[in-house]
Amino acid sequence: MFEKLSQKLNTVFDGLRGVKTLTEDGLSKVLREIRLSLLEADVALPVVRSILNELKEKMIGEKAIKETSPAETFTKAVHDELIKVLGEKIAPLNLDKKPSVILMVGLQGVGKTTSAAKLGNLLKTKENKKILMASADVYRAAAQDQLKTLCEQVGIEKLAIKDGEKPAEIAKRALKEAENYDILIFDTAGRTHIDDHMMDEAIDLSKKLNPTETLFVADAMQGQESLNVAKSFHEKLNLTGVILTRLDGDARGGVALSVSKTLNLPIKFIGIGEKIDDLDVFHPDRMAGRILGMGDVVSFVETAQAKMDTDAMQDMTSKMLSGEFNLNDMLNQMRQVKKLGSMKKILKFLPGMGGLTEKLESAGMNDKSVAHQEAILLSMTPKERANPALILKARKIRIAKGSGRPLGEIEKLLKQHEKMKKMMKQLQGAGGLEALAEKMPEKIDGIDPSAFFKK
């Protein structure tokens, strides 16, 4: 998501590097290039016009053309404007009522049911809420079974369905059952397109449930069509927020920059993958940073703290610095890092690294190569992994056959391991873990980036 927009905007900024002053003609040219970049990313035309008007007013109004570096000024101006367009700040759910009712609406196939389960999982694990899930989808084959399976996966209760029960009856029973819960998440039926029956049913359910939150689930891959559908739902149901799914895909991403500004609706959560915990609170400032290639270190550390075994990582780092790091440790490290997601996903979090994805792919460094390395390590005996010096030619040939990888890859992995050991010994000479922790930034939004480097 946003790769092309990010590349195009950074090309514009790169063209300004070294330019000391910017003429009126130069400003017009830059704004035109930004306009084309936003339109190609499928951002709604009214939103594009608003962004450009704000940028022009800011650049001229602050006399930025004459007094500061054009590249730095434009980057900051675009960053600030993106934050404004994306909603400026996070929009928490209204969960003051008990039970709080969250109504999920949207078209079929956008990931609504999966998002309902992901949201339940997030509220259970991070907010310690007692959740009841229910679904009014009595039309789509296996819809109830899908939600039941997802609920069992995360340990959340689901309202049992009675044969022949209608959506309104399900809503009435769900409300009664939810009296012993903190939150009721109610999934509605979707259609491949908006029709009167679906909308009337959603309106009726909303009246019966009186939800504290009505969340529209939009597929970021569908572009402006998602925005048009959201408008129709908002007019009838008074939506309170949006969940954007498939933000990990290759869509142009314009709907993310359009929905909040156009409908005055906050994006509350974003789906960033297929796993049940791949749902994040939406931070406008962090997303703006990602779009401009500034990375998102805070989200990266949050993800790492949530998914990785901190004690195991600290122990592993200590071993690396002491020179005791063997191939068993390398295998464990690989498995810890895999919890964060794909290499492409990880690179997006890191400043200036998003553009490396294609270069790494062409160099053969991708998720497949990681899987191949894991296969090689698993084809070794525990004794060989503990003492790589034992792995001579005959053993290498056996490992190659067992893993199905060329002999050259086995040798390459062993050399990589040796390089890592040498590099870590050099770091140890520079002060070790404590010195590395001291160089990390202070806490940001309550997150301590140095946590993984402290004993």
Image (cartoon, rainbow, N blue to C red):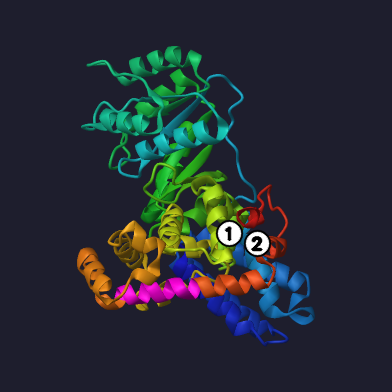
| Helix, strand or loop status at disc 2 | helix
Rendered position, 439 above or below 450? below
Rendered position, 27 above or below 129? below
The disc labelled 1 sits on which kind of residue? Ser
Q: Position of residue 99 (x, y in %)?
A: 53, 19
Q: Position of residue 191 (x, y in %)?
A: 29, 38
Query: Going 60% across and 59% down the picture, which residue do you hit?
Result: 297
- Where residue 217 sits, quadrant-wise, is top left
| Helix, strand or loop status at disc 1 | helix
The residue closer to the viewer here, 294 or 209, is 294
Q: Position of residue 186 (x, y in %)?
A: 41, 27
Q: Position of residue 210 (x, y in %)?
A: 50, 21
Give the left or right position of residue 398, taking residue 71 as reference: left
Whether residue 145 is visible to the viewer of this picture, yes or no, is yes
- State which region is magenta: 409-420
Give the left or right position of residue 359, taking residue 318 as reference: left
Give the labeled residue for mark 1. Answer: 318
The residue closer to the viewer here, 357 or 190, is 357
Q: CA distance from mark 1 to mark 2?
A: 8 Å
The disc labelled 2 sits on which kind of residue? Leu
Q: Is residue 18 magenta?
A: no
Marks 1 & 2, CB-CB < 8 Å contact: yes
Give the labeled residue for mark 2. Answer: 433
